[in-house]
Image (spheres, rainbow, N blue to C red):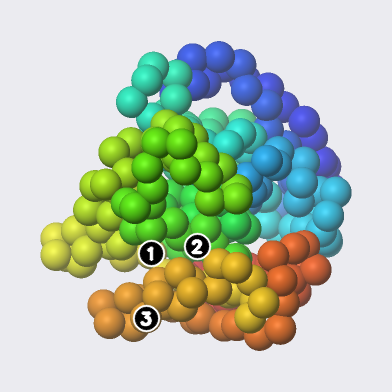
C-alpha cells in the first residue's frame, strides 16, 4: 500500500497543484490487471488530505484494490470558471484523471472509473460525472451541496451563512440563470437523456438532520422521474464525517457492483 503526495503542472489551473493518491500495490495477483479508479473530492473549506485524516479510505482502497485519487479543489465547487486558470471541472474530470491513469497504469475503461465526495465535493461528484460522462460510470454523492437551482434569489451583499453572494457569483456565474445553465447538474442530465448519451449511475445519501436534506431529496426525485439508475438513502445523521464514514464504503461498493 502506498499513500503519496504529488505535485504537477496543470494546464487547466495554469500552475503547479498538489494531490494525494492511495495505491494498493502490494504485489499480489490482482496487480496483473490495471486498477480501477475513484476520484474522491473534499468539501468547502477543505483540502486533499481531509479524507485521509477523517476516514478509513486506505482500508477501502486495500479491500477493493482501488486507486483513490484526492485532488485539491480549493473552494471551486469543481466548476470551470470563465477566467484563465480556473478550469477546476476539467482539471478533476479529465486532466488529472488522464495524468494518474498514465502514471500509475490504471484502467482506462469508463466502467472502472468513479467519482465521489461530500458536501461541495458531493456536488462536484455529481457535476463531474455529468460533465464527463464518457470518463465516469458513476458517482457517490454524500450530503451534496446541490445549490445551483437555489441561488437565483440571492442579491449583492447577501450571505446564506456559508458564503456570500459574491462568492457564489464567482463560482456559478449569473446566479439568476444558474438554474438553467450547465452549472446545474440536472441541466446536464436532461441534455444527456435527450441526446441518448451515456448516463452515469448515482449513489446519493444524506442525513435526516442535515441542512442539505431537501435539495438531495429533490435530486433523488429528479433521478426517479428521468428513469436514471440510482440508489437514494437517508437516515439519522448530520453534516459531518460520522455520517460520511457510514456511507463511503456502501457507496463505493454500490458503484463497483452496478457500474462495472
Say which quarter of the image contains residue 20. top right
Image spot of residue 253 (x, y percent):
63, 73
Q: Earlier in the sequence, mark 1 or mark 3?
A: 1
Find numbered disc 3 in the image and state the secondary structure of the residue it sits on: helix
Between the C-alphas of marks 1 and 2, the distance is 7 Å
Does 55 sit left or right of 210 as displayed?
right
- Residue under label 3, please give it: 221
* Disc number placed over residue 139 in the picture, else none: 2
Does 244 sit left or right of 133 as displayed?
right
Give the answer, above or below, for where 73 lies relative to 39: above
Image spot of residue 241 (x, y percent):
77, 62
Looking at the image, do the residues carrying marks 1 and 2 touch, with CB atoms under 8 Å apart?
A: yes
- Residue under label 1, please give it: 200
- At label 1, counting other C-alpha atoms closer than 10 Å, the crowd grade (few under 14, some 14-19, many 20 or more) is many
Q: State the residue in front, 175 or 133.
A: 175
Q: Earlier in the sequence, mark 3 or mark 2?
A: 2
- At label 3, counting other C-alpha atoms closer than 10 Å, the crowd grade (few under 14, some 14-19, many 20 or more) is few
Does 146 sit left or right of 2 as displayed?
left
Image spot of residue 50 (x, y percent):
77, 46
* Residue at position x 44%, y 25% in the image: 86
Q: Is residue 60 visible?
A: no
* Disc number placed over residue 22 in the picture, else none: none
Q: Nearer the viewer, mark 1 or mark 3?
A: 3
Between the C-alphas of marks 1 and 3, the distance is 16 Å
Q: State the residue in front, 206 or 50.
A: 206
Amino acid at each position: 500500500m502506498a499513500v503519496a503526495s504529488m505535485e504537477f503542472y496543470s494546464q487547466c489551473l495554469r500552475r503547479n497543484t498538489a494531490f494525494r493518491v492511495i495505491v494498493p500495490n502490494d504485489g499480489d495477483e490482482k496487480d496483473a490487471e490495471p486498477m480501477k479508479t475513484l476520484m474522491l473530492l473534499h468539501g468547502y473549506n477543505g483540502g486533499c488530505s481531509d479524507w485521509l485524516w477523517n476516514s478509513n479510505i486506505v482500508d477501502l482502497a486495500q479491500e477493493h484494490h482501488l486507486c483513490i485519487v484526492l485532488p485539491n479543489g480549493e473552494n471551486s465547487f469543481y466548476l470551470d470558471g470563465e477566467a484563465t486558470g480556473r478550469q477546476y471541472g476539467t482539471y478533476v474530470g479529465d486532466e488529472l484523471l488522464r495524468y494518474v491513469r498514465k502514471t500509475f497504469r490504471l484502467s482506462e475503461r469508463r466502467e472502472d472509473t468513479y467519482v465521489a465526495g461530500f458536501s461541495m465535493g458531493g456536488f462536484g461528484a455529481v457535476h463531474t460525472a455529468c460533465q464527463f460522462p464518457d470518463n465516469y460510470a458513476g458517482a457517490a454523492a454524500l450530503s451534496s451541496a446541490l445549490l445551483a437551482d437555489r441561488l437565483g434569489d440571492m442579491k449583492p451583499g447577501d450571505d446564506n451563512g456559508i458564503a456570500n453572494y459574491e462568492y457564489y457569483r464567482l463560482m456559478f456565474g449569473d446566479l439568476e440563470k444558474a438554474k438553467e445553465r450547465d452549472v446545474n447538474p440536472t441541466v446536464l442530465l436532461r441534455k444527456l437523456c435527450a441526446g441518448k448519451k451515456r448516463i452515469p449511475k448515482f449513489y446519493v445519501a444524506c442525513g435526516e438532520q442535515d441542512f442539505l436534506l431537501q435539495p438531495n431529496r429533490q435530486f433523488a426525485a429528479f433521478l426517479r422521474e428521468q428513469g436514471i439508475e440510482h440508489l437514494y438513502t437517508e437516515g439519522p445523521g448530520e453534516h459531518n464525517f460520522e455520517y460520511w464514514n457510514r456511507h463511503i464504503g456502501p457507496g463505493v461498493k454500490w458503484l463497483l457492483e452496478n457500474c462495472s
